[in-house]
Amino acid sequence: MLLNRDRAYAVMDKHRLRGLLAKENINIYYLSEYWESMTDGGWPFLDYAVLPRDEHSEASLILPTIKLDRLSEMPTWMSNIVTFSDYSGREVGQANRRAANDEPPAAPWSGWRVRPGARLTPVEQGWLDRSTAHADRLAATPAWALRRALKQTGLDRGRIGTDDPRVLQWMKEMGLDDIEIVDATNIFREIRMVKTPDEIALMRAAAQINEVATMAAAWALYDGARWEEIENVFHTEHARRGGRNGHIVGNLGGFRHGCVTRGVPMFVDAIGEYRHYFGDFGRSVVVGEPDAELVRRAKAMQAGWDVACRLLKPGTRRSHLIAETITAVQKAGLPEFFYVSPHSIGLEHTDSPLPYGREIHGEQSDYVFEENMIINIDMPFSEWGWGSMHLEDTLLVTHNGFEPLTSMQNELVVVPEKKTPAP
């Protein structure tokens, strides 16, 4: 179970919500455990998930009838599956169309063609049975299916939170006038901040896959290497271990000399997904022996990291950890250091409420750490004319401290000089 249901109910109570409507893929997946790949291909309104606050009301998953097959490989715990085909009344003239709140007929669908005389496998028989079971209760379109689900679960009135307020506005235009629309973009993030055991297991795997791939890229560095070569190593190693959709950077604006240069400090900072959960990892790297200044600065970063780790526990405020970490780095020998960004991580790289709209920064960026949050402490540093450094690991907040999900082997990475790429 990805959904932290107890936390979801508590957060809904806090915001006085009768239910949550998810339109974004990550929130549909979080609520239902169903992932729709077509959404990423330009069809953003195919699926919805609905979670009522009333524990006795059914949760609903809305999806196209032709996607019912996918429930065999990614079953959902949600019991109310509402499917749609397509509106079959397009030939009817506008003057004869039904009222806005009168649902039109749906095009018939009872599954794909079955080869005559074929013996279906158990999986295929499941596809056929599921399609047949839904054949006589199809909605006409995604919007009509969602409207039906809201009415079936008593969420056709009151305060409903959604990550896309446009969708509930359409519901109001379709006759559900008693809905009060609440933008729940950050409410979903607030719920997702505290992870379930199943999420923690996925994120441990994501963190470790990402770290191994990042370090493979770091050890592949050599004097004169182009960034494309390093990216190829990272993506290959990441995919080989089951990761997807990763990217790696080395210095924010690229290399100051156009390529990897012996003795010039740089960083590797990479994120990648495993089953839609992010891993994030960063290290300071140099090809060839580091000079005394780099060694001193790396030790100062380490001193700040040690302070951050001592502070990472339930009850510590994010802003306090930032201030104390910066002070520690500055006192330890890097007075120019000024930036630390502890961030929650999960289905998003920054999996916590964020300022948006008219806000740029604000109290939403600050929060108190809680048990079972997963936090990346992100410590980048760059100085034009010199180079860059970075320190970042993934940590699970426990009841009295933290558990590392990455190696915590966070000393300066010194790559031996070599003239050509590693074989």
Image (tube, rainbow, N blue to C red):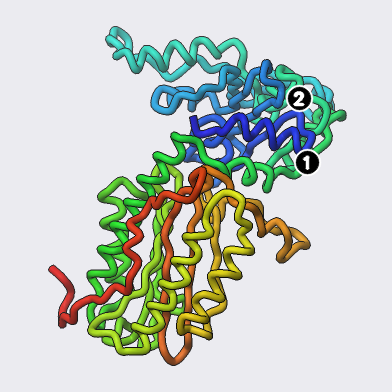
Q: Position of residue 125 (x, y in %)?
A: 37, 12
Q: Nearer the viewer, residue 48 or 402?
A: 402
Residue at the spot 48% in from the left edge and 23% down from the top edge? 68
Give whichever of 279, 168 is nearer the camera: 279
Q: Residue furthest top?
A: 117
| Residue at horizontal 40 percent and vertical 67 percent from the top | 269
As displayed, is residue 145 above or below residue 267?
above
Between marks 1 and 2, how big is the CA–CA gap? 13 Å
Amino acid on which disc 2 is placed: Leu
Counting labels gives: 2
| Circle 1 SS class | strand
Vertical placement of residue 163 versus 223, above or below: above
Name the residue tied to disc 2. 155
Name the N-terminal-most of marks 1 and 2: 2
Q: Residues within 10 Å of mark 1 (few under 14, many from 20)?
A: many
7 in relation to 420, above or below: above
Q: Identity of the amino acid at label 1?
A: Val
Q: Relative to residue 393, is residue 138 drawn left or right?
A: right
Q: Which mark is residue 182?
A: 1
Residue furthest to the right in view is: 178
Residue 247 vs residue 414: left or right? right
Furthest residue in direction bottom, as rendered: 385
Residue at image location 68% in from the left, 22% down from the top: 149
Residue name at image x 58 percent, y 63 percent: 321
Q: Nearer the viewer, residue 80 or 209?
A: 209
What kind of element bears circle 2? Answer: loop
Q: Residues within 10 Å of mark 2 (few under 14, many from 20)?
A: many
| Residue 208: x %, y % from top left | 33, 51
